[in-house]
Amino acid sequence: MLIRTGRADLDFAGVRTEFGLPREFPAAALAEAQTAVSRDIGPAEREDATALPFVTIDPPGAKDLDQALLVERVGSGFRVHYAIADLGAFVVPGGALDAEVRKRGQTLYLPDGNVPLHPPVLSEGAASLLPGQTRPSVLWTFECGPDGEPVDVRVRRAMVRSTAQFDYEGVQASFEAGNPHPSIEALPDFGRLRRERAAERGAVELQLPEQEIVPNGDGDWKLAVRPRADVDSWNAEVSLLTGMAAAKIMLSAKVGVLRTLPDADDGAVDALRRSAHALGVEWPDGTTPSRLLASLDPSRPEALALFVDATRLLRGAGYTAFNGAVPTVSTHAGLAAPYAHVTAPLRRLVDRFATEVCLAVTAGEEVPEWLVKALPLLPGLMGSSDTLASKVDRACLDQVEAWVLADRVGQRFEAVVLRADTNDADVFVANPPVMGRCTGENLPEGERIAVRLVEADPERRKVVFERV
């Protein structure tokens, strides 16, 4: 459902100012990026993999393309090639550009324009895996058995050439029509196998509505809920496979940086069981939280409420750097496996460093001194960046929600109660797709209720409902 704001003069300058977001790159960083683009990075230094017919799958209009994919059937198993943009070929350790991207941490996505991690000459140009362009990459190759589990993993620097750029909706439509691109024809079978392996491990997936802010071409904005298609999940499984392989490499060498999440304690699981019982969700004996959550229909109100409540299982995520010993917490409880970020270096700082560790370890080389010194700094840099990104995302959504609803104060809406306290609750209104606070008595989690909009303040970015 798309909702017009009815305004053509709205932007997010206030959000940018409030959070002090940078408007441009320092001249020295831009100069380094331009110099890096002009350097010759040829196949003499790398494997020539340009004959492999890679494709990319990204949101419509994306230019910062981190990953290119090729999935092949080999006998009863699969061979998966995953090419990742190689920022190590462009960013000089200790240089002005390196210093600036460490400050930024990650690309921030605002509706009226991104705040990129790297200068666009790299992120949307020479380093991006754009179609028809030969690019330096870090190439992962997985030889997988009939169960989708890897039996051999290789990672090395290579030159690659993407043959086509697709978006998720188009790829989903091609599968439904029975005419997918040959390079990803095997992706559904492989993706389903990997999702089954994830369920067996105990990975937790919360199928919550994903709000989006969409421009309509006239300078105003729409709210939408982006449906999660099967291809989203299948594609994500390849990225997760790569991150788990990277973590295994670093743990074997006892050096690197992981994305970690402590296991939920028994109290969190017991609380989730109580919530399921209160919501009328049957939890059979012997069923893990992972299996239960995967079995729920996300269109059901009680399922939405339980997904929100299950966030208690996924608290405490962070980054853990180590050198010389395996860290006490080395797994990501949400994935039920060790995991590292390596597949989005154009958009996330830590990926470049974790990738360089994997390349050194698998080549039998010492991890460079500059990299060893950088590792303990990364958890703090990424933690600050993640916090900022979360605040900016929420501020933008709050702003558009208030704009959309500003002229509808007093109107009634249908809502689902997600999480309730004594006299207020988080509710989800489907039309327009808004998550807001609701006041009143008797706000039962997981039930549909009628609410009235009592406040929609664009200045304070605040929306409040009350139960009718």
Image: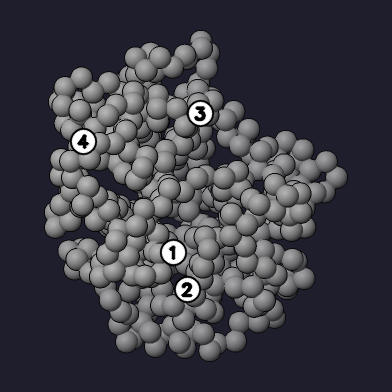
Q: CA distance from mark 4 to mark 1?
A: 40 Å
Q: Is residue 293 above or below residue 332?
A: above
Q: CA distance from mark 1 to mark 3?
A: 32 Å
Task: Specify which label sits upstream in the sequence, 1 or 3.
Answer: 3
Q: Tell me which residue sits at (59%, 73%) in the image.
A: 130
Disc 3 crowd, CA 10 A, few/some/many (<14, 14-19, 20+): few
Q: Is residue 387 visible?
A: no
Task: Specify which label sits upstream in the sequence, 3 or 4.
Answer: 3
Label 3: state its secondary structure.
loop
Q: Are marks 2 and 4 in contact (CB under 8 Å)?
A: no
Tell which tag, 4 or 1, sits nearer the viewer. 4
Looking at the image, residue 240 sits to the left or right of residue 106; the answer is: right
Q: Is residue 319 above or below residue 41?
A: above
Looking at the image, residue 118 sits to the left or right of residue 422; the answer is: right
Q: Which residue is mark 4?
A: 452
Q: Nearer the viewer, residue 409 or 395?
A: 409
Q: Which residue is mark 3?
A: 297
Q: Which residue is mark 2?
A: 123
Q: Are marks 2 and 1 in contact (CB under 8 Å)?
A: yes
